[in-house]
Image (spheres, grey):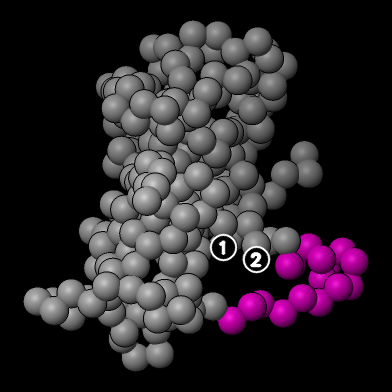
Amino acid sequence: TGLPEIDRPIPLTIHDACGARDMEETREAVRIILEELGCEVHEPYYTGEQSPCCGYGGLVQFSNAGMAQTMTRFAIQDVDETRLTYCMGCRDRFSREGARSVHLLELLFGGADEDRKAPGYSLRQDNREYLRRSMLFELWGIKEEEKDRMRLTYDEDLAELLDQRLILEEDIRQVIEEAVKSKCFILEKKTGLHIAHKKIGNVTYWVYFEPEGEGFRVKRAYSHRMEIRG
């Protein structure tokens, strides 16, 4: 068939992408591939043209996070086994809600860990940059060295909060780099933390940080779109 062999065919409940509701040939092709891989495939109650949106479509998660979470939980209800998706948004949304999920490409090319957590937005950017450099070298022979970056450290709770607030590591780096270079920051005597801000585009970012080793430990960060005049 030309398809690679997979180590362990697993029982799967397929979740059709809402973008494929009017693409019957695509939905059928996915099922044919799974059958040839030897997977045991089950259909949920809502499937095919009635498949619910995972909460990623229309960028709902950015405009109304609560609604997106409700949509995700509805899509994964009453299904105990691993969900097979062929949409990156579905795969990551399900994983964020604690459901076992795997993308079709993970089955085909390895790395099918249904318990793997969805990457945060900063890691997504890092992965895309790595892919860009890899393709430049492998396809066109252009070698581009990875740029040195300021080392940032923060705990898992803050990492999750930054992801919810759509604050990227690169945003934080820009704030700290400018604060260190200009020596323009507030030093909080009680905690010893440095407090700095920077407007990037239409968003102002505030970061609480302290030196740690060869980099900085971030303790808090938030952003707003208010324009402060004075």
- Residue at 42% across, 28% down: 63
Residue nearer the viewer, 207 or 90: 207
Q: Are discs 2 and 1 less than 8 Å apart at CB?
A: yes
How would you rate the neighbour count of disc 2 (Cα within 10 Å): few for under 14, some for 14-19, many for 20 or more?
few
Residue 40 lies within the magenta run: no
The residues tagged by marks 2 and 1 sit, at their Cα atoms, a distance apart of 6 Å
**Residue to which mark 2 is pinned:** 130
Quadrant assignment, res 208: bottom left
Count of numbered badges drawn on the protein = 2
- Residue at 55% across, 9% down: 49
Toward the bottom, the furthest residue is: 213
Residue nearer the viewer, 101 or 11: 101
Q: Is residue 70 visible?
A: yes
Where residue 84 appears, x then y in whole percent? 49, 34
Q: Amino acid at mark 1?
A: Asp
Q: Please state the extent of the stretch shown in magenta in the rendering.
A: 133-148
**Residue to which mark 1 is pinned:** 126
Mark number, residue 172:
none
Toward the left, the furthest residue is: 190
Where residue 128 appears, x then y in whole percent? 63, 57
